[in-house]
Image: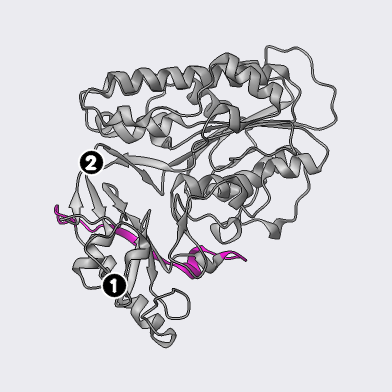
Amino acid sequence: MGLFDRLRGKDHPRVAFIGIDGVPFSLLSEHPEEFPNFAALADDGSGGAIDSIVPPESSACWPALTTGVNPGETGVYGFQDREVGSYDTYVPMGRDVQATRVWDRVTDAGRQATVMNVPVTFPPQRNIQRMVSGFLSPSVDKAAFPDEFRDDLEAMGYKIDVNAKLGHDDDKTAFMEDAHETLDKRYEAFEHYLEKDDWDLFFGVFMTTDRVNHFLFKDYERDGPNKDAFVEFYRKVDEYIGNIRDLLPEDVTLVVASDHGFTSLDYEVHCNTWLEQEGWLSYESDDHDSLNDIDSDSRAYSLIPGRFFINLEGREPRGSVPEDEYETVRAELKAELEALEGPNGKKVADRVVVKEEAFRGDHDDIAPDLVVIPNHGFDLKSGFKGHDEVFGTGPRNGMHSFDNASLFVDDPEAEIEDADLYDIAPTILELMELDYTRTELDGASLIRQ
């Protein structure tokens, strides 16, 4: 496995986790000639498709992946969450994650963890070896700790995220140049700190994969004009994963995973527009742009991605649905969502999940009452500014999927079968021989011995 011909001399094994945000397993497994390093990782160790979580949105997925528990325990359900007993919303950050991260378990055991570019970790924790926060962080200066780490990253020209606005241009040249630069800088930093070899857990995420997928995935799936640029980018991802695998010492197991899958986007579905047209949602004025603008006649509203809330009396400030009618009203809304069809005659929903099926824990008081897992092609939006039509298109041509996330473990003892995102944290703990209580976590180790 390694170029290093010595071990660190520690009496416990180590793990290097590399996240490839939003990369579907089928993309890698169906093209071994294009992506030979991923193919070798699967052949020598284990690889397979896994399920994501409900809902499959990065801001909810990464807290779940890094803790092994569902949003009812992490307290993070999506890119935008609502305050308890209020229509106010907020963007969850690292301190909003209420469950124990895998690197905190490593640190509590007296070991060292380096954490780089994981979403929903800003501001950086100061109780671990080193951390640079991921997407939504304002700058490297504010996102990195300790100071020496910050200074080194700034000197490297480290980039937290790609400029996604460039992806809105019809010509993707500038966007892809920026994506390559971001990927290169991320790899350069990963390589530098992997080679320091002073950590027990290295946990780093390539998020640029998700960004490229959002703007070029349909080109890949349907032979669009940017397919070659898409494949070229992923060849580089494959090369970097191979380089990382080669430089790791023999006592380190490499784990590579994505937080959700990806598919082509055909229609954006404006869920609050649909609710308004169907008589579920109304506003206090025509000039509305937030959840606070809904009126007391509303029976339901939506937040991204595909989360639906009953406007419940006693829970929402202007709740209109009495508690004794909750089950009936929710069942009515569920049935209408299940029946909703797109312009192409296909059902929008693959399934509609009720909150009790997906969420458990001390932080389920802001859980959605229903979550729609869409069929491929329907991307669920939930703005409050209003749209003339329920179905539309935007600059993106790729969307998240619940199925077909990726997991590779450089250990043939790993069995990636009927697995999901919750299994990754306990697998890492098992590989590192760290004790944990099985009932604490929603997942289970995939290492079979």
Do residues under tags 1 and 2 come within 8 Å of each other at their CB atoms?
no
Quadrant holding the N terminus: top right
Pointer 1: what residue?
335
Query: What range is drawn magenta here?
Result: 342-363
332 sits left or right of 170 in the view? right
Q: Is residue 349 magenta?
A: yes
Locate residue 331, reporting x and y percent.
Answer: 34, 77
Locate residue 444, reporting x and y percent.
Answer: 64, 51
Q: Nearer the viewer, residue 97 or 429?
A: 97
Mark 2 residue type: Gly
225 sits left or right of 318 in the view? left
Q: Secondary structure at mark 2?
A: loop
Residue at position x 44%, y 48% from top?
57
Measured in 3D between alpha carbons, the distance from the residue under mark 1 to the one under mark 2, in whole angstroms, is 28 Å
Mark 1 residue type: Ala
Tell us which disc is closer to us: 1 or 2: 2
Residue 116 in sight here: no
Q: Which of the 4 image quarters holds residue 22? A: top left
10 Å neighbourhood of mark 2: few (<14), some, or many (≥20)? few
Reply above or below: 244 against 61. above
Pointer 2: what residue?
394
Q: Secondary structure at mark 1?
A: helix
Q: Which of the 4 image quarters holds residue 30? A: top left
